[in-house]
Image (cartoon, coloured by chain):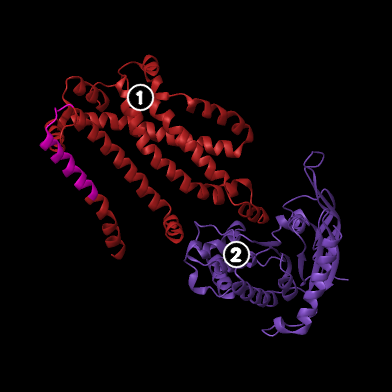
Amino acid sequence: MNGLRRRLSASLPPVAFGLVGLALWESVLRLTDPRGFVLPPPSEIVAAFVENWSQIWTGTRLTGYVIVTGLAAGVVLGVIGALLVTRFRSANETITPVATAVNAIPIVALAPVFNAWFGLISPRSNQAVVIILVFFPVFINVTKGLTQVQPSQIELMRSYAAKERTITREVRIPNAMPFFFNSLKIVSSLSVIAAIVAEYFGGRQDSLGPMIIQSAGLTRYDDAWAAVFASAMIGIALYALAALAERLVMPWHASVREATT
Amino acid sequence: MTECAVRAEGITKIFNQGRPNEVCALTDVDLAIEPGEFVSLIGPSGCGKSTLLRVIASLTEPTEGQISVYGKTAEQARLDRDYGMAFQHSGLFDWRSVSRNIELPLELMGWSKDKRQKRAGEMLELVKLGQFANHHPAELSGGMRQRVAIARALSFNPSLLLMDEPFGALDEMTREHMQTELLRIWSETGTTVVFVTHSIPESVYLSTRVVVMSARPGRISTEIPVDLGGRNADTRESPGFFAKITEVREALRAVEGAE
């Protein structure tokens, strides 16, 4: 109960700040009345959101599918890659440089190329962009978590005659959990950006990316903003899920943070 | 003649042998420790005291020389789980409760859950942390964490307790309190202890024998038996205690002077 009250009072300032910001946005635009393409006021965006609800819902489902599947596959691959490179030295020497090199490529710029591979209206190319973008932060962070273990903890396990597999299970993986969830929070928003930008170049035409481009092209900026709003909601929902999973999986971590702050 | 708890003969340890950054950490070290002894290793930084402890623990292989622990090779002793270890860093696992930290070695040894929990409870009583079984390490003070680490090291009745500056990160008050606790636990369990420390009073207060080491190359220079009898609150004020401190300090000075 006490915790709930504390959390409510903690969320009060940002909520108030957000509301004041929206009110300012709305009133400044009403007072100065610039032309609509500069920035539609929030009320018009909400109206456009409601008006186009069925299209936005279709687009959210399609784009959401690309994001969620790409995110899941990228995260799984990142974790597997991290486990491989920490377990096998040869894997480290092979995978890490390649992953670093691939990460240096502006992947979104490859979206048109992927379209040629997978077909212009297939979601596959967009999924591929999301997977590749998601892979690297997960891979790097989890690898760090698996390797940055207190040396004395490893020595302790060895003094118990623990095998490397046991050390991985009992020490490395739990140690990597905070790193994993950190990267999960990062890629939950990154995946949304990746999917939307990739969709600018192709994929299903009724998903959110094309909706933004087309609305903007028809100078229907309130519709474009409504679609942006929908994609932001996907990102926020995914971030919240990642944060919730972190709390559920690592109840000890919250106590670590509270003790150190 | 009884079997030695630890017998080290001609131990030499060279790191990075044959490379430009070659370091000779230990040279020709002989050491015999009887069962039930409390032996402190003391010396300047770089004298190889931690390396010697790790060689005994079979965490690193000596370049030359023989180690036997209760008549076995050090590696066999490690595989037989003869060692309880505690470090300066408590090395507790944040993700496990206090009780489950103590249970970890027992888990690896295949104890049943009931037996594990019972033993963890007993060990927590021994280190006087009975009420903290379900806390997480982050909720404990440094001294309490160190006590949990000691309880974990002793949970499976190891025949040899190896400690590497376990109280090094604690403040003076907590440190003295922990020393008293350790001696009580030692007398209650009868374990053999090898204890690495930087502190002269600590080595004198705790040990039945202080082994003074010198640096570059690391070797044993003097061994000083400490026969102060049962320690109590007055021991730290007694003339005998100060005399031993002086003796160890002079031995250390001789070591440093020789450099």
Image quarter of residue A46? top left
B238 sits to left or right of A51:
right
Viewport quadrant of the C terminus of chain B: bottom right
Residue contact at pointers 1 and 2, CB within 8 angstroms: no
List x then y, in percent, for residue A130.
Answer: 38, 29
List x then y, in percent, for residue A64.
Answer: 29, 33
In the image as oriented, which residue stretches furthest toward the top? A116
In the image as oriented, which residue stretches furthest toward the front? A32
Q: Determine the CA span between mark 1 and mark 2.
A: 51 Å
Numbered badge on residue A11: none
Image quarter of residue B85? bottom right
Query: What span is colored magenta in the figure?
Result: A17-37
For disc 2, the marked residue is B149
B62 sits to left or right of A114:
right
Q: Is the residue A118 above or below the residue A59 in the image?
A: above
Q: Chain of mark 2?
A: B
List x then y, in percent, for residue A204.
Answer: 27, 22
B124 sits to left or right of A132:
right
List x then y, in percent, for residue A168.
Answer: 57, 46
Q: Chain of mark 1?
A: A
Query: Does the magenta run of residues contain B222?
Result: no
Query: Chain B in the picture: what colour?
Result: purple
Viewport quadrant of the N terminus of chain B: bottom right
Nearest the camera: A81 or B179? B179
For disc 1, the marked residue is A126
Res. B71 in view = no
Q: Is the residue B211 above or below the residue A42 in the image?
A: below
Which residue: 57% across, 44% down? A147
Mark 1 Cα shell of 10 Å, populated few (<14), some (14-19), many (≥20): many
The dominant secondary structure in magenta is helix
Query: Does the magenta run of residues contain A26?
Result: yes
Which residue: 69% across, 59% down? B81
